[in-house]
Image (cartoon, rainbow, N blue to C red):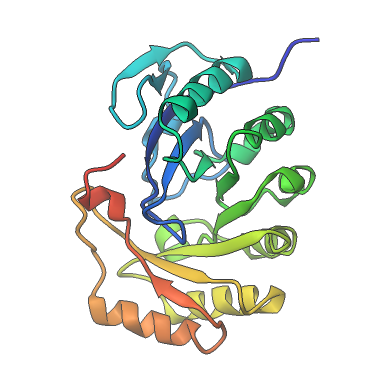
């Protein structure tokens, strides 16, 4: 029987620029492919057919093209070398994409082994609830998106997000919503009520649309108005842009 492999876009070491783990150093494993086509997508390299790239020295950007698919043994060897050479630096492994849960069959084998090295942090669009369920035991932290129509262009995902939340809430979890100049009050109300129906203590993070140069492209007063709306329903609502962009981090 062949060993599970995956189509990877890149593997590298950097600081987390979004969400509750902002500033923590992580090993990023970026999977190829996504089940959505959001209008605001900041990972176009997850959709190419080019070879993946693997960083050789953590944080030094000495990338080497690596043919896909990538084996677990290749990843374990790379990350184990980083942990021995740079002990105590990395907080966790970020499983990201694209949408990594499309690789559920591979993750069933990979996550238990990767988790022996570092805690597992899943970054996901929060729609593939059936894929999440068998993996949840080997995940430590989940950063889940709710895709609102004004910034994603996606509609009718509310029921999928609710089912995903119900499973993800058994682990450490926060929800991220990307907000833009066109975001409407009703989108925030519905998102907040959805989260509150599962647990009002789940943190919600508004991520204003951020340009590649780190400029926040949403009126600052409007962002505060959206936060005020969400706070009617939830115990913790934060505003955090994509900080890695203005720090020139990956």
Image quarter (top left, top right, bottom left or bottom right) of the C terminus: top left
The answer to whether one can see residue 156 in this image is: no
Left or right: 62 with respect to 226? left
Q: What residue appears at the point 60 percent right and 72 percent down from the top-left corner?
A: 202
Callout count: 0
Q: What residue appears at the point 49 percent right and 62 percent down from the top-left corner?
A: 176
Between 157 and 95, the one lying in front of the other is 95
Left or right: 88 with respect to 3? left
Residue 97 x, y percent position in the rendering: 50, 38
Residue 227 higher or lower than 38, as above or below: below
Between 126 and 153, the one lying in front of the other is 126
Residue 213 x, y percent position in the rendering: 18, 50
Between 10 and 56, the one lying in front of the other is 56
Residue 170 x, y percent position in the rendering: 73, 61
Q: What residue appears at the point 32 percent right and 56 percent down from the top-left corner?
A: 242
Where residue 222 sits, quadrant-wise, is bottom left
Image quarter (top left, top right, bottom left or bottom right) of the N terminus: top right
The answer to whether one can see residue 192 in this image is: yes
Left or right: 243 with respect to 33? left
Left or right: 90 with respect to 156? left
Q: What residue appears at the point 79 percent right and 43 percent down from the top-left corner?
A: 134
Residue 102 higher or lower than 132, as above or below: above
Residue 88 higher or lower than 157, as above or below: above
Residue 80 x, y percent position in the rendering: 53, 24
Where residue 114 sits, quadrant-wise, is top right
Where residue 227 sits, quadrant-wise, is bottom left
Q: In the orientation shown, which residue stands out farthest toward the bottom?
A: 232
């Amino acid at each position: 029987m062949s060993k599970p492999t995956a189509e990877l876009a890149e593997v590298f070491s950097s600081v987390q620029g979004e969400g509750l783990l902002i500033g923590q150093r992580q090993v990023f494993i970026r999977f190829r492919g996504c089940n959505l086509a959001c209008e605001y997508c900041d990972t176009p390299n997850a959709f190419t057919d080019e070879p993946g790239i693997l960083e050789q020295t953590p944080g030094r950007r000495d990338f080497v093209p690596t043919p896909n698919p990538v084996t677990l043994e290749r990843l374990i060897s790379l990350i184990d070398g980083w942990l021995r050479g740079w002990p105590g630096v990395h907080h966790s492994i970020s499983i990201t994409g694209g949408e990594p849960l499309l690789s559920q069959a591979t993750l069933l084998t990979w996550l238990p082994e990767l988790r022996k090295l570092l805690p597992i942090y899943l970054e996901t669009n929060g729609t593939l609830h059936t894929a999440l369920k068998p993996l949840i035991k080997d995940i430590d932290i989940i950063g889940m998106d709710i895709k609102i129509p004004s910034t994603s262009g996606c509609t009718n995902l509310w029921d999928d997000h609710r089912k995903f939340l119900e499973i993800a809430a058994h682990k450490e979890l926060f929800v991220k919503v990307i907000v833009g100049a066109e975001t409407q009050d009703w989108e925030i109300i519905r998102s907040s009520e959805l989260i509150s129906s599962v647990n009002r203590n789940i943190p919600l993070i508004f991520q204003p649309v951020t340009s590649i140069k780190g400029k926040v492209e949403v009126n600052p007063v409007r962002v505060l108005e959206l936060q005020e709306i969400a706070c009617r329903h939830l115990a913790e609502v934060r505003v955090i842009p994509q900080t890695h962009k203005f720090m020139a981090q990956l």
